[in-house]
Amino acid sequence: EPKEGDIQMSEEELRVVEAARKREQERKERPEVVRARFVAWAEEFDLGDKDWVDETFIFHPDGSVTVEELYLKNTNISYLPKGLKSVGGHLDLSNNRLTSLEGLPREIGGSLDLGSNQITSLEGLPREIGGSLDLGGNQITSLEGLPREIGRDLWLANIPATEIPEHTQVGGKIHVDISQTALAKDIKKKYPG
């Protein structure tokens, strides 16, 4: 006999809840599995070995990974390993072979430098970046997907995009190349001053 205030579910509702719980458990990877993936990635690009990975990254019990700052400029990487949740400070991935933002952390407290890669889309970009954002020298044709907030400057030099969305709050200046007349005109119209 149920007590007052008890919630009863049908068998179908119980199956749905149990299936959702199981999916959530499967999504959370064990830290040792995530660590092994990071070690393989570091070794693939000659960034370091398991000692470098252990000194650089923090592996949490829920399978997420954090790092205080990460400088990977000119390391020839073409992707980031899945699982990086946040970077407390700066993340420099400039002058590499990245074609997408898959694996990018959701939170970046400092600046994010993605300049001079082969990125074509902003899908996967964090919603907020505490410092500057450099997207210059990529193949980005649309700036849809820019974060809601960029703490400092936004660098867009030498990209093919010609329009900027109005929703992004930029704490500093927006930089473009003198040859990007259409983008410069759109920025001036949407972000006067």
Image (cartoon, grey):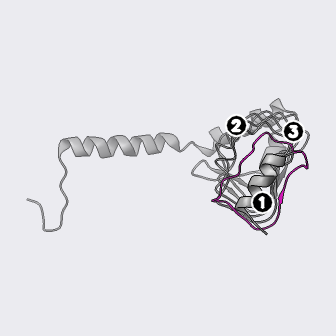
Q: Residue at x 17, y 46 (%)?
A: 10
- Quick check: is 164 in the magenta stretch? yes
The tag on residue 47 is 3
Viewer-nearest of labels 3 and 2? 3
Q: Which residues are the magenta region?
A: 158-179
Residue 49, how many percent across, how many down? 84, 38
Neighbourhood count class around disc 1 (C-alpha, 10 Å): few under 14, some 14–19, many 20 upward: few
For the stretch drawn in magenta, what is the main secondary structure? loop
- Sequence-first tag of 2 and 1: 2
The residue type indicated by label 2 comes to: Ala
Q: CA distance from mark 2 to mark 1?
A: 48 Å
The residue type indicated by label 3 comes to: Leu
Neighbourhood count class around disc 3 (C-alpha, 10 Å): few under 14, some 14–19, many 20 upward: some
Left or right, 93 with respect to 162, comes to: right
* Total numbered circles: 3
Location of residue 190 with respect to 17 vertically, above or below: below
Assign the N terminus to one quadrant of the image: bottom left
Q: Residue at x 76, y 57 (%)?
A: 187
The residue identified by callout 1 is: 188
The residue type indicated by label 1 comes to: Lys
Location of residue 173 with respect to 92 vertically, above or below: below
Residue 108 seen by the camera: yes
Location of residue 93 with respect to 112 vertically, above or below: above
Task: Quadrant for residue 147, please give it.
Answer: bottom right
- Quick check: is 173 in the magenta stretch? yes
- Sequence-first tag of 3 and 2: 2
Q: CA distance from mark 3 to mark 1?
A: 41 Å
Assign the C terminus to one quadrant of the image: bottom right
Residue 152, how many percent across, how many down? 79, 65
The residue identified by callout 2 is: 36
